[in-house]
Amino acid sequence: MNLDSYTMDWLDGQTRAPSRDDPDRHDKFDPYREAMQRVTEVFLALGKAGRIDLAEQVLRDERRRFGGTERMSYAQLAAATAVLAGDAGIRMLAEVALDDSYKNWANYGIEALWLAASNKRLPAEGYASSASEVHFEIPSAIRAKARATLDELIVNSKEDKALFAKILTLASLEANKNQVVGGVNDFTEHVMKVLAAGSIAVPASILDDFEALVSKNLPEERYQEFLKTHPTVLDPLAAEVIPKHRLGTEYVTDFVIRRHDLRYLVVEIEKPQDRIFNSSDDFTREFSHALGQVLDFQGWVAEHGEYARSSLPNIENPRGLLVIGRRSALTARQESKLRRWSINSNLIDVVTFDDLVTSGRQLLGSLRALIQ
């Protein structure tokens, strides 16, 4: 069979459950199950072949058609197909979920990610699975990818009303189902854990974007603008970021960060291309000047405490943070020298742009392990 020939019209013409009022309903049910079996095998073949064309068409279709129960089954099968297809299918499910409009069947994509992430069978238990004996075997590596994608969608839902509504809808459906069959609403519990962890973690997509930005030779303002939008890249405990904060008439910080623990950071941002060491393994002029800026910020706060606290409540002896250069540009000797400098510095942290990406990914990995 040519898999490209299957369309929504073809699917709608394949199956239709016999009406409850049909006196011959029981005689028609076996042929109906056979038709559902054939449709399931088509979706299974698509998933194994890595073809998500039909799956995406089903999930994005919003036409009002007959056969609501069958259409639900198609959506569940389509979502399972996408998961089975691996990375490309999982990305497609995320794109459908992130669509601004409320696609009728988008929730089945989110549900499939959840089923894969929680090691449950696909398609979902219920009508689609009971109408066919075919089930999709999902490798563990794909399940792990599904979990990471689902968790990122949950974190992103804090800033996306349409996505948050879809997450809540699935949580509500799971709650209703569990009231009937008895059990714990695992999905809601997972969402709450991820949202709690997500308040101090940076989504993987943001870290990927930042890493791509760091690899380019751009004006310093571009990096500052990105970090202004995503302050937890700078500090996972950032509660508020204040760009270009004036300290009297003398200084302007790149950022002042107020943390959830009520402490402050005064931040100086340079460029990834700025070097920390010269060829003689001495600190460069750029590094020394930037470090001097941080010291000036801290000194001003110490000397103007009451005035500083009029705009930055409770600030006192803020830590300093200097972001400069690339870790990959350092030799082993230079890394060792910078590490010794950091050990001897009690109130200033020097990190490279690479370090921000690495620490963000390490924190994200630790929180995912904790959630699991």
Image: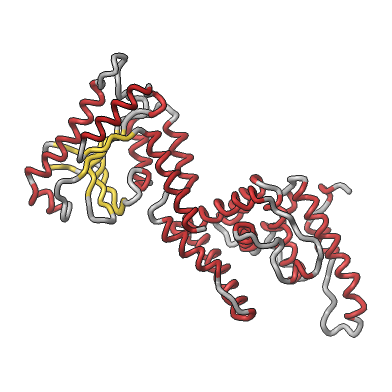
In this rendering, does residue 66 appear at all? Answer: no
Residue situated in front as seen by the camera: 274 or 224: 274
Residue situated in front as seen by the camera: 10 or 169: 169
Going 75% across and 67% down the picture, which residue do you hit? 128
Q: Is residue 85 above or below residue 197?
A: above
Q: Quadrant of residue 25?
A: bottom right
Q: Quadrant of residue 197?
A: bottom left
Going 22% across and 40% down the picture, which residue do you hit? 320
Q: Is residue 117 above or below residue 127?
A: above
Total marks in image: 0
Residue 6 drawn at (x, y percent): 82, 53
In this rendering, does residue 310 appear at all? Answer: yes
Q: Farthest residue in the top direction?
A: 280
Residue 69 drawn at (x, y percent): 74, 71
State the scheme by which the image is colored.
secondary structure
Residue situated in front as seen by the camera: 178 or 336: 336
Q: Is residue 335 above or below residue 8?
A: above
